[in-house]
Image (cartoon, rainbow, N blue to C red):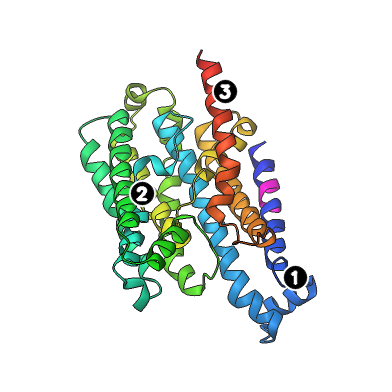
């Protein structure tokens, strides 16, 4: 079943990627996209495909994939169906790093400054969460991550409150709402190594997650080093989600939704969820990115993070009610 599910998700993802190359303000024909990809033409369709849409869709796949994968790993590690990457403070730290770059004007002199500062911020908060929780268990990690995340977002709010000019506040808010617009191959080169490295570390936790489903004590009796698994999950999340947030801004709910979409189809096995959740997350972000190009309002375009949140918030409410019903 898992093999067929993966094949089906890969097919859906490829179709979504193809649609992403076609759709936009300027619609392209399949023949124009094929010519741009294989002949490297430098006409207008070629420039649109190779310089605008291709790096954007690659980032959408990477960002959605790592968010879905990290959500599946954290839900298995923490044995909490409501766990998602922001729980460990990585998203908050990356957001704060980008805000610092914008607030102090680094982004004005170097366009990639918010991305680089966000990457550092994600690592700092993940490290702080790990240090604060290393003498405790899973609950300590959740509490430490929540505390660090709260502090980071409080600092972001303070920066917005004290923004030196309206433009800085607008730029900060735009970044926080998440977007893949205007991303280039430079962003791909920055994010891809970290996201792929983080994904590998997260996939290495698969066997341990199967044992952890029985509880930490039972997992340790089976020879699982729970501390090592926790470190792999935290460092993989910091690498992957930190880089994803650095490039795309704060995008929530993907890490929550993607694992739950595929979980019933794999028999609720933590290790078997990882790859399908990765593909489901990538599909979700690619489709949402297409939607943001096609939905236009007079005031402003819809940002990617905002669009996904409008879908994720009702799903989160449904999930809370479902968990409450099952435990009540």
Q: Are marks 2 and 1 in contact (CB under 8 Å)?
A: no
- Residue 106 versus residue 149 in the image, above or below: below
* Disc 2 from disc 1: Cα separation: 36 Å
Residue 225 can be seen in this image = no
Q: Residue at x 52, y 69 (%)?
A: 183
Query: Residue 97 got which mark?
Result: none
- Mark 2 lies on a secondary structure that is helix
Q: Residue at x 55, y 45 (%)?
A: 309
Q: Return the residue at label 2.
A: 92
Question: What main secondary structure does the magenta stretch of the protein show?
Answer: helix
What span is in magenta?
A: 7-11
Q: Return the residue at label 1.
A: 27
Residue 101, position as x, y percentages in the image: 32, 66
Disc 3 crowd rating (10 Å Cα; few below 14, some 14-19, many 20+) is few
Q: Earlier in the sequence, mark 2 or mark 3?
A: 2
Q: Return the residue at label 3.
A: 322
């Amino acid at each position: 079943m898992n093999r067929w599910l993966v094949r089906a998700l890969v097919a859906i993802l490829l179709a979504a990627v193809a649609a992403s190359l076609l759709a936009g303000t300027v619609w392209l024909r399949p023949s124009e996209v094929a010519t741009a990809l294989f002949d490297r033409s430098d006409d207008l369709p070629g420039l649109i495909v190779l310089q605008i849409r291709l790096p954007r869709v690659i980032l959408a796949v990477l960002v959605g994939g790592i968010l879905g994968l990290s959500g599946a790993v954290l839900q298995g590690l923490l044995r909490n169906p409501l766990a998602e990457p922001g729980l460990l403070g990585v998203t908050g730290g990356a957001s704060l790093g980008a805000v610092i770059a914008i607030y102090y004007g680094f982004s004005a002199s170097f366009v990639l400054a918010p991305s680089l500062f966000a990457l550092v911020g994600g690592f700092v908060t993940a490290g702080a969460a790990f240090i604060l929780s290393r003498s405790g268990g899973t609950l300590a990690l959740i509490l430490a991550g929540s505390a660090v995340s709260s502090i980071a977002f409080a600092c972001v709010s303070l920066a917005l409150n004290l923004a030196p000019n309206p433009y800085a506040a607008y730029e900060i808010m735009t970044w926080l709402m998440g977007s893949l617009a205007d991303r280039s191959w430079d962003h791909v080169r920055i994010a891809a190594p970290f996201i792929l490295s983080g994904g590998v570390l997260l996939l290495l936790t698969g066997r341990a997650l199967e044992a952890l489903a029985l509880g930490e004590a039972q997992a340790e009796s089976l020879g699982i080093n729970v501390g090592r698994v926790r470190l792999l999950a935290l460092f993989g999340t910091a690498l992957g989600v930190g880089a994803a947030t650095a490039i795309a801004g704060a995008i929530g709910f993907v890490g929550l939704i993607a694992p739950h979409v595929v979980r019933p189809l794999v028999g609720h096995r933590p290790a078997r969820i990882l790859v399908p959740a990765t593909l489901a997350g990538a599909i979700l972000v690619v489709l949402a990115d297409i939607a943001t190009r096609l939905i236009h309002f007079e005031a402003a375009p819809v940002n990617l993070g905002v669009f996904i949140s409008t879908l994720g918030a009702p799903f989160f409410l449904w999930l809370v009610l479902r968990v409450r019903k099952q435990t009540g």
